[in-house]
Amino acid sequence: MEESLTDLKLINEALEKKFAQTQAKAMNPLALAYIGDGIFSDTVRKYLIGCGQQNVNLMTKASISYVRASAQAQIIHALIPELTEDELRIVKRGRNVHSQVPKNASAADYCYATGFEALLGYLHLSGEPQRLEDLMVKSIAIINQLKP
C-alpha cells in the first residue's frame, strides 16, 4: 500500500504540532484527559519494565493499581498543595466535566482522576516535559507508599 507524500507530511505535522499554553488551556478537558491517560499509562508501563518485571500478566495487574480511578484520585489529592494556580484550574476543569462514570469507579474518584489526567495532558501539550515528568514520578511514588 503506497502512501502519498502529502499524507505522510500531514501525519507528521499533526504528530509534531506544538500548542501554546493558552491553546492547551482552552482545550476540552476530556481531550486533555484522553492524552493524559495514555501518557500516564505508558509511564507506568515503562516503570514496571524498568523495575525488572517481565511477566505481562503481572505487569497488567500491577499497572491497574496505578491507573485506576481511585489511585489517580489519591494522587491528585496528594499533589494539589504543590500545584500552580494554572495547574489547579486545569484539574478543576477536568474534575467538573460531565462524562460517563465506569461501573468499577465511584463518581467522585472518577471526577478527580479525570482532573489528574487533564493536568498531565495539559502539561504534555503545552510543552512542559520536566514538570510533567516530575509530577508523574511523584505520582508513582505516592501509589508505592500506599501499597501494603
Image (cartoon, grey):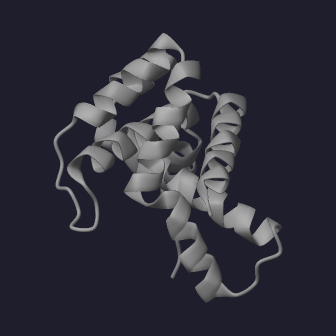
The front one of 61 and 20 is 61
Q: Is residue 78 above or below residue 6?
A: above
Specify the farthest residue to the front. 148
* 10 left or right of 94 in image: right
Tell me where residue 105 sits by quadrant.
Answer: bottom left
Residue 5 visible in rendering: no
Residue 75 visible in rendering: yes
* 121 left or right of 142 in image: left
Q: Is residue 95 above or below residue 54?
A: above
The front one of 26 and 43 is 43
Percent position of residue 92, x then y: 33, 26
Q: Is residue 64 above or below residue 53?
A: above
Instruction: Give the residue drawn at x 43%, y 26%.
Output: 24
Which quadrant would the C terminus be assigned to in this image? Answer: bottom right
Tell me where residue 97 sits by quadrant.
Answer: top left
The image shows a total of numbered marks equal to: 0
Q: Is residue 79 above or below residue 65?
A: above
Percent position of residue 103, x then y: 21, 67
* 16 left or right of 50 in image: left
Percent position of residue 143, x then y: 60, 52
Instruction: Give the residue drawn at x 59%, y 20%.
Output: 82
Instruction: Give the residue drawn at x 55%, y 31%.
Output: 79
Percent position of residue 121, x then y: 48, 39
